[in-house]
Amino acid sequence: MYIFFLALPKLLTLPCLFSCLPVCLHLPGMQLSGQLPDSYSSLSNLRTLVLNNNSLSLSVPPSWGQLGKLSAAYLYNNGELQGCLPFEWKARFASDFDVAYYLLEGTGLTGFCGTTS
């Protein structure tokens, strides 16, 4: 198991070397800004995504629905995020995972695409 704690001043594209390794991408409160990169959908072993308390904007790329092992994501307090979350995430997160807080709180996200919750 590999866990990477990256400290980057800006949201950068991860090198191809990392595409099969990280199980946790942990970047809370790192002053990250800009759009979430579509390329993160290639992180095939990613289980936990922690990007809360940053200044991320636009929307969660639909391709992030391909993160087949993702079981938790923390996007709260990214006020410029908008739109909806990939529908595929709904079935992957445990029933006790607080989507309203960990994914929607302090964002413009509306829930999962194609659903009313």
Image (tube, rainbow, N blue to C red):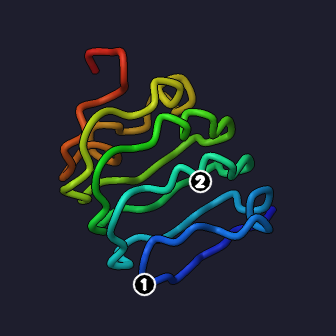
Q: How far apart are marks 1 and 2 (CA)?
A: 17 Å
Which residue in the protein does label 1 denote? 9
* Residue occupying the point 26% across, 43% down: 104
Residue 68, image quadrant: top right
In this rendering, position of residue 31 left or right of residue 92: left
Q: Which secondary structure lies at badge 1? A: loop
**Quarter of the figure that contains the N terminus:** bottom right
Q: Position of residue 92 (x, y in %)?
A: 57, 30
Sort mark 1 into few (<14), some (14-19) or many (20+) by Cα contacts within 10 Å.
Answer: few
Asked if 40 appears above or below 22 in the picture, the reply is: above
In this rendering, position of residue 59 left or right of residue 36: left
Q: Where is residue 5 in the image (x, y as percent from the top left)?
A: 59, 76
* Residue occupying the point 36% across, 15% down: 114
- Tally of numbered tags: 2
Residue 64, image quadrant: top right
**Quarter of the figure that contains the C terminus:** top left
Tell which circle, 1 or 2, labels the residue nearer the N-terminal end: 1
Q: What residue type is labelled 1?
A: Pro
Which residue in the protein does label 2 denote? 40
Q: Position of residue 17 (x, y in %)?
A: 80, 68
* Residue occupying the point 70% across, 68% down: 3
Instruction: Kindly identify which numbered label has been placed on residue 52.
Output: none
Q: What residue type is labelled 2?
A: Tyr
* Residue occupying the point 59% across, 53% down: 40
In this rendering, position of residue 63 left or right of residue 43: left
**Proximity of marks 1 and 2: CB atoms separated by less than 8 Å:** no
In this rendering, position of residue 61 left or right of residue 78: right
Q: Which secondary structure lies at badge 2? A: helix
